[in-house]
Amino acid sequence: MSTAMGQLVSQGDWPAVESRFNEMEFVQRLGLVVDLSDPDRPRGNVSKIESYHLGGIGQDFVNGAVTSGVIDIILGLTGLRFAEMGYFATRNLQIDLTLPVEKDGFYVTSRATSRIGKNLFAEATVFNPDGEPRVHATGLVRLGIRKG
């Protein structure tokens, strides 16, 4: 985590942190908008589905790789609260692609469920625009990998 980002987190300047993530090329290419209005429950919105979001065999559903990438980002953001410990990253994801994610957009919410030492356990859910759950994931965020 860059010093500037770490300072923003320690100051609780969540709008600035949110803005930094939304300026990242990878986030923009996914069509993702990060929402940290509640930093304990990071959210990501993909409202406009493009052809590159769709499954590789002509399906009208969002490709699981896209869904997984968005989950990884949003679940990983549960580690922001512990940024003073140093860098953090998603270490493990278990994703259950229960129902297809239709091409009318989706959003992901996440929350930390427990912490043991430098391991933060979290869960994320993908919803369609009507708020119906489609995908569930659990994961582990490793905290304090090293100081920035």
Image (spheres, rainbow, N blue to C red):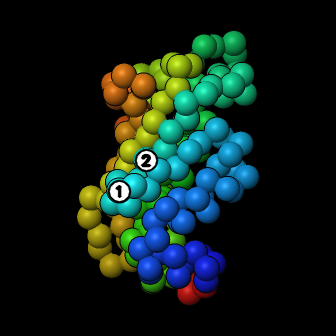
Mark 2 crowd level (few <14, some 14–19, many ≥20, 10 Å Cα): many
* Mark number, residue 43: 2
* Mark number, residue 148: none
Residue 68 lies in quadrant? top right
Identify the mark nearer the N-term, 1 or 2: 1
Q: Quadrant of the C terminus?
A: bottom right
Q: Quadrant of the N terminus?
A: bottom right
Residue 10 lies in quadrant? bottom left
Residue at image x 56%, y 87%?
147
Q: Nearer the viewer, residue 131 or 23?
A: 23
Q: Nearer the viewer, residue 49 or 92?
A: 49
| Above or below, 88 relative to 58 | below
Residue at image x 70%, y 50%?
26
User: Tags 1 and 2 in contact by the CB under 8 Å rule?
Assistant: yes
| Above or below, 3 relative to 139 | below
- Residue 111: image x %, image y %? 33, 54
Q: Is residue 32 visible?
A: yes
Q: Secondary structure at mark 2?
A: strand
Q: Secondary structure at mark 1?
A: loop
Determine whether, in the image, residue 97 is placed left or right of residue 112.
Answer: right
* Mark number, residue 38: 1
